[in-house]
Image (spheres, grey):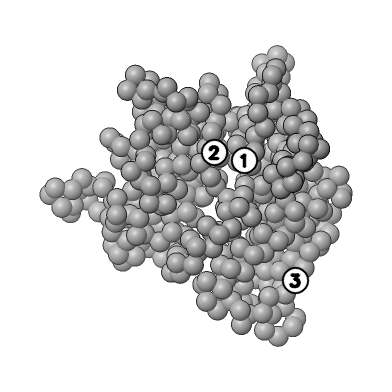
Amino acid sequence: MSETHSIDEALVLTSLQKILDSETFSRSERLRAFLDYVVRKEREGLAHQLKGYSIGVDVFARNESFDPGGDPLVRVQAGKLRKLLRQYYETEGSDDAIRIEIPVGGYVPVYAPQSQPTATTAAPDMPADAGIPSAAIAASAPPSFWSRFRLASTGLLALTVLNITALGLHATSRYLIPAGTADSAGPAGFTRTASALPRIAIRNDFGSSALAASLADSMRIALGQLAFVELVEDFDRANRIARQPDTLDFTLSIARSEQPGQLNVQLRHNASGDIFHEESIPEADLHLVSERTFAASAFAGRRLSMNGQLYAFADQNALSSNLMRCLTATNEYRLHKSRQTFETAWSCQSQLIPAKEPDRLVSEPHHLISMAREAEADLERRNRAGA
């Protein structure tokens, strides 16, 4: 609805990412994809497209003959999503600034402050859960860490759109999940090896520089939109959801530089302690929200993309997973469209996602990641069942 669309973009997307990274949602790839899809569609002004048919095709990979009236798949999954959201807000999300809800009878998300008004305070002709204007959220939401993400600049959305091609940001095809897969992407403690991606934690010296903390917030938003790296708050907590080799754990540190008026940004490999990239950013270039957003977006594009320093460091030190190599090979084919790059990408994908007769090359990073992780989860489930 129009009121919810006016709520600050960064606050909604940050709250969404916190839900997707939570332990509550860790066992359901389908429900994470479902929630991600409907929130981003609504944020893009496409709420009118959130129908049972489009969700069945885009999220659950149903073919064009899908009939949501005869197949209850989407309705059933929506019920599960509502239940899991309630569980999340009763536990991990109890301190979140806003709630994301999917009202019964539709699939368009609404947003409300944690301190919910009672049903008697709602307008007589408006359901209590119909969402509230952004002004009410700003007035009633309690201050919290996440409030730093409330970026007032419309430049965030514009820069995000400009970077879709360069950074491999979210696209509709990211939500495709092979039909017939289980709701769970794997039990808690599932191990990723072939489908591991670089995990990055962001650290900043808030005490020495408020700008460092603000830039760190912008970096979190920029990294949260990348397909081919994973933003984590804590590595131990991330391992409780899905274990993977610590050789792909990295830390992005932001602190005041020894040079006056500069912030120092470092990329460090946790296992070896190697600092493989370091740069300074003038504080004078970071006072506006739009300036910090641009700096974070540019850093992510140059340093953390498949052609950036992080992937190069992993490749040079033989740390890359099969999925990382496959993403890079597929990106090379998308850039060059040569026979050689096609064959390299095809061969890599055939090994990563075994199929009797592969019928196409998966070009979208999000789709390739989802399929690779589902394949590895299936293999582990079969191994456990046969043990």
> What residue would you read off at disc 1?
364
Residue at x 38%, y 63% (from the top left corner): 142
**Circle 1 Cα neighbour tier, 10 Å, few/some/many (<14 / 14–19 / ≥20):** many
> What residue would you read off at disc 3?
279
What amino acid is at disc 3?
Answer: Glu
Judging from the image, what secondary structure is the residue with disc 2 in? Answer: helix
Q: Is residue 28 left or right of residue 319?
A: left
> What residue would you read off at disc 2?
173
Q: Which label's residue is closer to the chain start, 1 or 3?
A: 3
Whole-percent x and y of residue 189? 65, 34
Whole-percent x and y of residue 330? 72, 40
Judging from the image, what secondary structure is the residue with disc 3 in? Answer: strand
Q: Residue furthest front?
A: 338
Q: Residue furthest left?
A: 124
Asked whether the beta carbons under mark 2 and mark 1 sit within 8 Å of each other, the answer is: yes
Q: Which label's residue is closer to the chain start, 2 or 1?
A: 2
Closer to us: mark 1 or mark 3? 1
Q: Is residue 319 left or right of residue 240?
A: right
Whole-percent x and y of residue 227? 62, 47
**Circle 3 Cα neighbour tier, 10 Å, few/some/many (<14 / 14–19 / ≥20):** few
